[in-house]
Amino acid sequence: MQQKFIKIHPADKVAVALCPLPAGSVISIDHKNITLTEDIPQGHKFVLEDLQEKEPVIKYGYPIGITREPVKKGAWLHVHNMKTALGDLLSYTYEKQDTAIAPTEKRFFQGYRRPDGKAGVRNEIWIIPTVGCVNNVASAIEKKAQSMIRGSIDAIAAFPHPYGCSQMGDDQENTRRILADLINHPNAGGVLVLGLGCENTNIDELKKYIGPYDEKRVKFLVSQESDDEISDALDLIEKLVDYAGSIERVPISCNELIIGMKCGGSDGLSGITANPTVGAFSDLLISKGGTTILTEVPEMFGAETLLMNRCENEALFHKTVDLINDFKNYFKSHGQTIYENPSPGNKKGGISTLEDKSMGCTQKSGSAPVRGVLSYGECVKEKGLNLLSAPGNDLVASTALAASGAHIVLFTTGRGTPFACPVPTVKISSNFALYSKKGSWIDFNCGELLEGTDLAALRDKLFDYVIAVASGEKVNSEKAGFHDMAIFKQGVTL
């Protein structure tokens, strides 16, 4: 029988409805009976004891905000009667927690070994425009090139974006770093870099960021120097297909697997089902020597100390403090409210404050120590859990994960989304209803936790699924032919 509600932590002053609960329902919890005074929607909170005005609301064992007014036991608690308690910039103290992960037995996936030693989980041909002016050309080339797919080639995909020119300073640097990261990504067996010729981020400039490259794997085309750029591009793609199409999958240890972790369109169940399952997966992969990357810094606000105290050393602690405060200053520099989250969809799903969202979001990090802190566009270097500077926007953050080296992105959601990113994007539902309704979007269902499935069993099931995806099984967005990318715009446009 489905569980109807959950009190997540013994210290909590609220419980969460796991299905719609009508007013008048009698809830037995902690050996006490509570009568609900209002209808409680699925994923929403109800109060377990009388709360006074400005009293901290405890969920996950931590404060997630304060009450706006007195709230009676059994009442619905949401944005109408609670609010954030967060301030602006904070001072932090390093209180290290020992969170070492014990090693477990090796696992392998069937991947692609690149000449530079890197491992990939896809063997695709990527068309990377240097500037938005050639986006339509890139898309036309992608469409005409589909008939060339053969051998071990998984897909031929273009990645249009609106940048590459009329940018300045760090904003321009970020675009160049992201494009170079994607060009060097091991999921691409071959890359066509498509330039215009007069852009700031022209091919000669971009080569400085790409570094050494295999001329068989990476080809360049300047459109202004070609009589027929589409025809010339197809000739180059033919050569890339000939080169990459003969490469076969081989067994590769999971200690080379890099997984990005992101959530979007969350609901009140995301922090109870999907995110803890991904967190347990992260710990399991790390126990096998693998790597995970957690991002969307604004959705760490309110839960950042949990990550800071898991930093392996004090230097990483200070980098994490900077990660948080730099993003807050980014908001402030644009005259924006730091704690604008949660979104309307989050609120509809039961998330009331940014602390509420952040406590659920950080469940994806599991319990492993933080071993790396990455700036936007920086590639992962340390095995284990890494934190990456990127915003909460789904497309921007997922692209940033791919650019930092993630082979696959695990994307948890309570609302659903069809988007993709440059690497396979596994959509993980927090509830059974979403999985049932959107089978063409959702790849994995964590609503099973509400049906009695054990967390460890669901973690293992997710791990097996990720191994299958890494070995070539396509996720739904790949089956639909979706490939998206988005670069973080941070500066003026000339």
Image (spheres, rainbow, N blue to C red):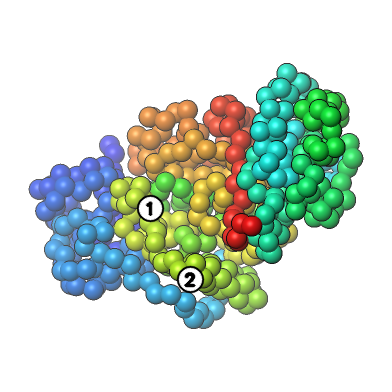
| Quadrant assignment, res 69 | bottom left
Discs 1/2, front:
2
Quarter of the figure that contains the C terminus: bottom right
Can I make out residue 383 in this image?
A: no
- At x 16% / y 47%, what residue is drawn? 39
Looking at the image, can residue 440 be seen? Answer: yes
- For label 2, the crowd category at 10 Å Cα-Cα, with few meaning under 14, some 14 to 19 and many 20 or more, is few
Which residue type does callout 2 highlight? Lys
Alpha carbon distance from label 1 to label 2: 19 Å
The image shows residue 60 at horizontal and vertical percentages of: 36, 61
Q: Mark 1 highlights which residue?
A: 343
Q: Position of residue 370 (x, y in %)?
A: 60, 65
Instruction: Say what secondary structure mark 2 lies in.
Output: helix
Label number found at residue 332:
2
The secondary structure type at the circle numbered 1 is loop
Q: How many marks can you see?
A: 2
Image quadrant holding the N terminus, namely top left
